[in-house]
Amino acid sequence: MTFTILVRDSHGFFGAAIASSSPAVAARCLTLRDGVGAVSSQNITDPRLGPKIMDLMASGLSAKAAIDQIASADPTADYRQILAIDERGETGVHSGRQSLGTYGSARMPSIVTAGNLLASDGVPQAMVDAFIHSTGELEERLLAALRGALAAGGEEGPIRSASLSVVTDIGWRVTDLRVDWDDEPIERLATLVGVWLPQRDNYVTRGIAPETAPAYGVPGDE
């Protein structure tokens, strides 16, 4: 029901983008942490797995080792699809035997994609290719990956929710944009990216140095 990309960029920042036929997909699936990595727990989702894997990576385990440790101890692992990327850009994927429909993954250094109930097994690689050939801010490149997946067929059914998130070295998600239910959530997400990016750095400034923060530009705060 889901396709996802996780990335570590050249600055050591992490980004994740996800889309699904289910509502509010990012609320259940994505976990990101500055300086540690990104995780998606999907297919038949257990939202507890992302934080557990993140803690293991924070302790020094690689993405693959962290996923392997969790999957080997979890009696429900056959129903889970899990992907992760760590601070070194190393990746790991687990697709349990009960993953739904056509499922698969693709990897290269500092990029990992995976999905289930896909229209074709080429969708994960299409996400990688779209990201590699994109330019701009990390958020824009993650959006390009989602569009690449959709152009390759996306899911078997219609996409209803989509999200993208980025963490840097600030201490919170500097970008966390979600469309929880819509007929064209990826394009709605693109609209949000266009609104958000020109303001993103100002909101970081408001968090870390409020005395220098620019006005919001709304009535009463000119």
Image (spheres, grey):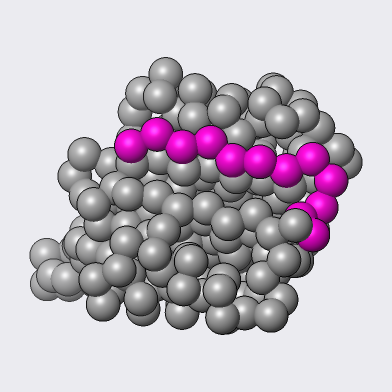
Q: Position of residue 109 (x, y in %)?
A: 33, 37
**Nearer the observer, 183 or 66:** 66
The answer to whether residue 105 is above or below residue 166 is above
Count how many numbered circles sit on residues in the image: 0
Q: Position of residue 51 (x, y in %)?
A: 46, 77
Asked if residue 80 lies left or right of residue 15, the reply is right
- Residue 144: tell me if it is visible: no
Residue found at x 57% / y 28%: 125
Give, as a single range, the part of the protein colored magenta: 98-109
Q: Is residue 107 magenta?
A: yes
**Nearer the observer, 156 or 161:** 156
- Residue 71: tell me if it is visible: yes
Q: Position of residue 121 (x, y in %)?
A: 71, 31
Q: Residue furthest front?
A: 72
The answer to whether residue 181 is above or below residue 29 is above
Residue found at x 28% / y 41%: 9
Name which quarter of the figure residue 174 lies in. Answer: bottom left
**Nearer the observer, 202 or 155:** 155
The answer to whether residue 192 is above or below residue 51 is above
Asked if residue 79 lies left or right of residue 199, the reply is right
Residue found at x 62% / y 79%: 74
Q: Position of residue 179 (x, y in %)?
A: 66, 54
Q: Residue furthest right?
A: 157
Residue found at x 45% / y 48%: 6
**Nearer the observer, 17 or 119:** 119
- Which quadrant of the figure contains the C terminus? bottom left
Q: Is residue 108 magenta?
A: yes
